[in-house]
Image (cartoon, helix red, strand yellow):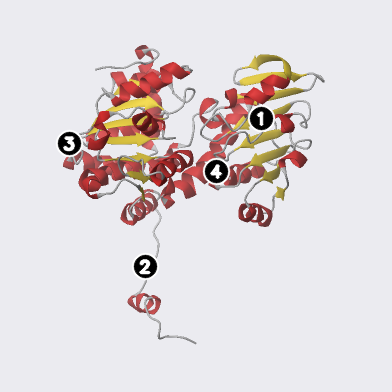
Amino acid sequence: MQYSIKDVNLFSEGEAKIKWAMSNMKVLDTIRQRFSRERPLEGVKISACLHITSETAVLAWTLKEAGAKIRLCASNPLSTQDGVAASLVKDYKIEVFAVRGEDRDSYYEHIKKALEIEPDITMDDGADLVSTIHSENLSFADNILGGTEETTTGVIRLRSLAEENRLKYPIIAVNDASTKYLFDNRYGTGQSTIDGILRATNYLLSGCTFVVCGYGWCGRGISMRARGMGAKVIVCEVDALRALEATMDGFWVMQLKEACPKGDIFVTSTGNRSVIRKEHFLLMKDGAIVANSGHFDVEIDLEDLNDIAVHRKLTRENIEEFKLKDGKKINVLCQGRLVNLSAAEGHPSMVMDMSFSNQALCCEYLTKEGKNLQNKVYEVPEEIDGEIARLKLYSMGIKIDELTQQQKRYLSSWQIGT
């Protein structure tokens, strides 16, 4: 085995986390049991660039049980749980290349190590793995059956690549499955972002003014959970339809410049860059807290903030204080990286159960159908999405009604009217 992790002796800590996650991922467990019997991925090589968390470990084990050879690397330098990485190596014999806090060079070196196996399938969270394959024009790309992409930012990047007719193999946008974005993005990001902010700051949200930049599904979830904690929530948007939705959902909606003097906490969740920049920092109140829940660390313009700061220091773990010329202090969480994974543990296992079930079933689908697909970004097949929803309900002990034959005829007919 090859691997590059912090310390293999941390395995017992990681194993406990993995077992806990496993107990809360009933859908993926059902899939794993079938995979173990049928071995649909026998001999398939998978390179996966994902957050190295306990939930990812359950997915990796599921893929191994299906017969796959898998190499893992991190999709964010601060999201790796070193104990989990150690357990994957020692207990599950899965090759991992990830260390929490690794620098940029190490991060990309680990991506290259994950790709050394010349994968049949790639699994990405943010598209750094795929972009490395394309930017370095790696020779084995033409032999890849297909890939999957976990997050909004990655899907945006890959669709851009496809629009330029440069995508070398088909990708399934796991992020766009209903059983992913309606739950993982909304409820998972909402809860884990609040969790990360609270762990980093121990701040009282009740009564504070909480500014959310972006009202996509992640922004919706963050806004909902902040309001649930008693915060007064402001939403800032550039899309008229989403701004209107936020208004109708009962949130204050205004330009970010107007929100800056009011906000106590700011969270970016847009998938874009330089959302909060110099002009905004200068308008913020003393002690403002700024965090990011978008995939990459570009949403908060830290270069702008550093340029106007006269002093910066780490005040406690995951909080860096920037002091401006006028004495005002602005606190940035987790170096502007994903606050939910850097300061907390990411999404709860119960919601990742659906997201990673999509990943597992899409790998099986690509093994069967990858050679018949074009080099473009595909939606998750409806039958996979529907099956995961059914399995999730079953795992929760919930039964739903079925249409009668009369109802089916009515819904498929045009003759019956008033």
Give the answer, above or below, for where 217 lies relative to 5: below
Judging by the rendered image, the residue that carries numbered circle 2 is 402
- Secondary structure beneath disc 2? loop
- Secondary structure beneath disc 1? strand
Q: Quadrant of the N terminus?
A: top left
How far apart marks 3 and 4 lie (CA) works out to 36 Å
- Residue occupying image coordinates x 67% and y 35%: 266
Q: Marks 2 and 4: which is nearer the front? A: 4
To which quarter of the image does residue 350 belong? top left
Q: Residues within 10 Å of mark 3 (few under 14, many from 20)?
A: some
Mark 3 / mark 4, whichever is N-terminal: 3
Mark 2 / mark 3, whichever is N-terminal: 3
Amino acid tagged 1: Val
To which quarter of the image does residue 229 belong? top right
Point out residue 50 in the picture as x, y percentages from the top left corner. Answer: 40, 31
Amino acid tagged 4: Cys
- Residue occupying image coordinates x 32% and y 30%: 137
- Residue occupying image coordinates x 64% and y 44%: 228
- Secondary structure beneath disc 4? helix
Q: Marks 2 and 1: which is nearer the front? A: 1
Mark 3 / mark 1, whichever is N-terminal: 3
Foreground of the two, 414 or 186: 414
Q: Residues within 10 Å of mark 1 (few under 14, many from 20)?
A: many
Judging by the rendered image, the residue that carries numbered circle 1 is 290
Judging by the rendered image, the residue that carries numbered circle 4 is 218
Foreground of the two, 245 or 169: 169
How far apart marks 2 and 1 lie (CA) works out to 48 Å
- Residue occupying image coordinates x 65% and y 26%: 202
- Secondary structure beneath disc 3? loop
Point out residue 218 in the picture as x, y percentages from the top left corner. Answer: 55, 43
Judging by the rendered image, the residue that carries numbered circle 3 is 42
Amino acid tagged 3: Glu
